Image (cartoon, grey):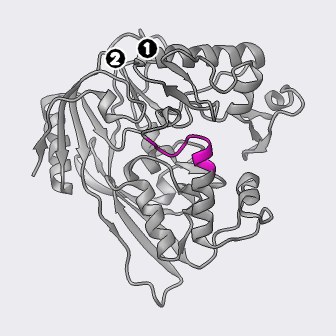
C-alpha cells in the first residue's frame, strides 16, 4: 500500500546532500499505487515530483511544496535464455540501475556493461539517455512503459518514438521548461508528461562485451579500441575507473557527494569547434556537429580539481565535472560555484555549459 513517510528534506533524499524540505513524501510499492498517487496529485492540482535515487537532482533551499512520490519497487525480470541469442530484460522504474547492470553481467547479457556504477534508478535512465564509456541506454532500450498524465492512461513507447539524443529524450523534452525571462528565485518545478513505470532492454547473450569504444576503458582493460573483453572484466574496469574519479557512491568520500557530472559535454557546430584551441577534444556527434569535453574546457578555463576548497562546495579533487558538497553546503553554495565555472568557461571559450541535473525551484 502507499506509505506516507516522515517529513524529510532533499538533503536526505539526494546524493548531493542539499535542498530544503519535501512537502509530502510517499512511497509506493506497486504500479497501481504509483499511478494512483500521480493521479491524486494531478486531480488536486498539487505539484508533483517523482523521485528515484536522487542522483541527478538539485532542489532549492526552500524545498518543494508538493507531493514527492518515491517508487520503492525493485523487480528485475528476464526469461530463461539458455537457448536464446537475444533476451529482453525488464526492470521497474524504482529498481537500482547498477543492480540491473550487475544482473546483466552475471547472466551473460551484453549491452549495458560499460554503464556500471552509475547511481540512481532505472526510471531516470531513458529520460537522460544515460551513458558512459561509449555506451548509452538508447542502444539497448526497446520500450518504455509510462503513465501518460495528459491522456490519463498507461502507454508503451517504442524506441522509434523515444527520440533519444545526447543526454535527452522525448521524456525529458516533455518537461515544462523554465522560461528564459523567469525569476530564478520564483517557485518552479519540472512537470513531465510521462511517468516511467518500467523499461525493457533488448540484450544479447554472450561471454564477451560489445566492442570497447572508449580509449580510457580500453587502456584499463589492456585491449585495443574495438576489441572485446569478458563482461565481468568490463564491469570491474568501469567501476575502477569511476571509483578513481569519485563517481561511485562512498559515504566516506566527500568527492562522491555530488550529482555526478554537473555539466553536459557541449555539442557544437563545426565552425564553433574549429574556434577551440588546438588540443581541445573534438568528437563527431552526427549531422555535422562536434562534441567537445566539458571537463577539458573547465580545467583550461582555470578551474582545476578541488577548485573552491576549503568552501562547503567545491569541484571534486578527482574530477572537475563534479560539483561536490564538502559538508554543510546549501543549494545556494552549489549553484554559486557552478555559475562561477559556467561563466568562466563562457568568458574563456565563448561556450555556455548546460547543467545535467534536473533543477527544481531554482535555475543556474
Q: For mark 1, what is the residue?
A: 332
* Nearer the observer, 145 or 223: 223
Spot the residue most to the front: 252
Q: Quadrant of residue 315?
A: top right
Position of residue 184 measured from the top left corner of the image (x, y, whole percent): 42, 12
Spot the residue most to the bottom: 83
Seen in the picture, residue 29 relative to 57 is either above or below; the reply is: below
In the shown orientation, is residue 311 left or right of residue 133? left
Residue at the spot 63% in from the left edge and 50% down from the top edge: 241
Position of residue 134 measured from the top left corner of the image (x, y, whole percent): 66, 54
Q: Quadrant of residue 305?
A: top right
Label 2 vs 1, first from the N-terminus: 2
Q: For mark 2, what is the residue?
A: 61
> Does the CB distance between marks 2 and 1 fall below 8 Å?
yes
Residue at the spot 22% in from the left edge and 29% down from the top edge: 8
Seen in the picture, residue 135 relative to 76 is either above or below; the reply is: above
Seen in the picture, residue 21 relative to 37 is either above or below; the reply is: above
Q: Helix, strand, or loop for circle 2?
A: loop
In the shown orientation, is residue 31 left or right of residue 187? left
* Nearer the observer, 31 or 327: 327
Q: Magenta region: which residues? A: 241-250
Q: Helix, strand, or loop for circle 1?
A: helix
Q: Is residue 344 magenta?
A: no
Amino acid at each position: 500500500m502507499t506509505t506516507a513517510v516522515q517529513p524529510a528534506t532533499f538533503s536526505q533524499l539526494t546524493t548531493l546532500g542539499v535542498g530544503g524540505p519535501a512537502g509530502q513524501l510517499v512511497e509506493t510499492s506497486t504500479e497501481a499505487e504509483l499511478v494512483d498517487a500521480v493521479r491524486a496529485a494531478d486531480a488536486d492540482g498539487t505539484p508533483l515530483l517523482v523521485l528515484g535515487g536522487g542522483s541527478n537532482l538539485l532542489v532549492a533551499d526552500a524545498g518543494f511544496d508538493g507531493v514527492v512520490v518515491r517508487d520503492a519497487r525493485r523487480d528485475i525480470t528476464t526469461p530463461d535464455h539458455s537457448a536464446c541469442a537475444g533476451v529482453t530484460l525488464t526492470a521497474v522504474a524504482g529498481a537500482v540501475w547498477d543492480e540491473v547492470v550487475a544482473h546483466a553481467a552475471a547472466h551473460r547479457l551484453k549491452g549495458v556493461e560499460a554503464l556500471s556504477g552509475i547511481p540512481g534508478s532505472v526510471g531516470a535512465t531513458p529520460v537522460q539517455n544515460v551513458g558512459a564509456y561509449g555506451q548509452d541506454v538508447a542502444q539497448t532500450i526497446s520500450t518504455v512503459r509510462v503513465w501518460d498524465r495528459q491522456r490519463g492512461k498507461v502507454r508503451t513507447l517504442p524506441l522509434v518514438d523515444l527520440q533519444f539524443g545526447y543526454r535527452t529524450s522525448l521524456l525529458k523534452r516533455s518537461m515544462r521548461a523554465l522560461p528564459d525571462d523567469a525569476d530564478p528565485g520564483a517557485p518552479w518545478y519540472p512537470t513531465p508528461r510521462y511517468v516511467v513505470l518500467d523499461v525493457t532492454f533488448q540484450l544479447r547473450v554472450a561471454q564477451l562485451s560489445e566492442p570497447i569504444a572508449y580509449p580510457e576503458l580500453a587502456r584499463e582493460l589492456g585491449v585495443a579500441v574495438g576489441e572485446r573483453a569478458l563482461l565481468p572484466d568490463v564491469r570491474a574496469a568501469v567501476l575502477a575507473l569511476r571509483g578513481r574519479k569519485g563517481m561511485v557512491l562512498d559515504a566516506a568520500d566527500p568527492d562522491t557527494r555530488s550529482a555526478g557530472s554537473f555539466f553536459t559535454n557541449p555539442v557544437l557546430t563545426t565552425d564553433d569547434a574549429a574556434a577551440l584551441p588546438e588540443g581541445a577534444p573534438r568528437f563527431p556527434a552526427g549531422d555535422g556537429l562536434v562534441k567537445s569535453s566539458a571537463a577539458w574546457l573547465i580545467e583550461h578555463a582555470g578551474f582545476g580539481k578541488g577548485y573552491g576548497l576549503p568552501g562547503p562546495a567545491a569541484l571534486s579533487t578527482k574530477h572537475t565535472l563534479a560539483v561536490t558538497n564538502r559538508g554543510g553546503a546549501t543549494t545556494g553554495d552549489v549553484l554559486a560555484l557552478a555559475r562561477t565555472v559556467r561563466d568562466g568557461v563562457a568568458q574563456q571559450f565563448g561556450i555556455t555549459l548546460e547543467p545535467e541535473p534536473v533543477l527544481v525551484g531554482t535555475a543556474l
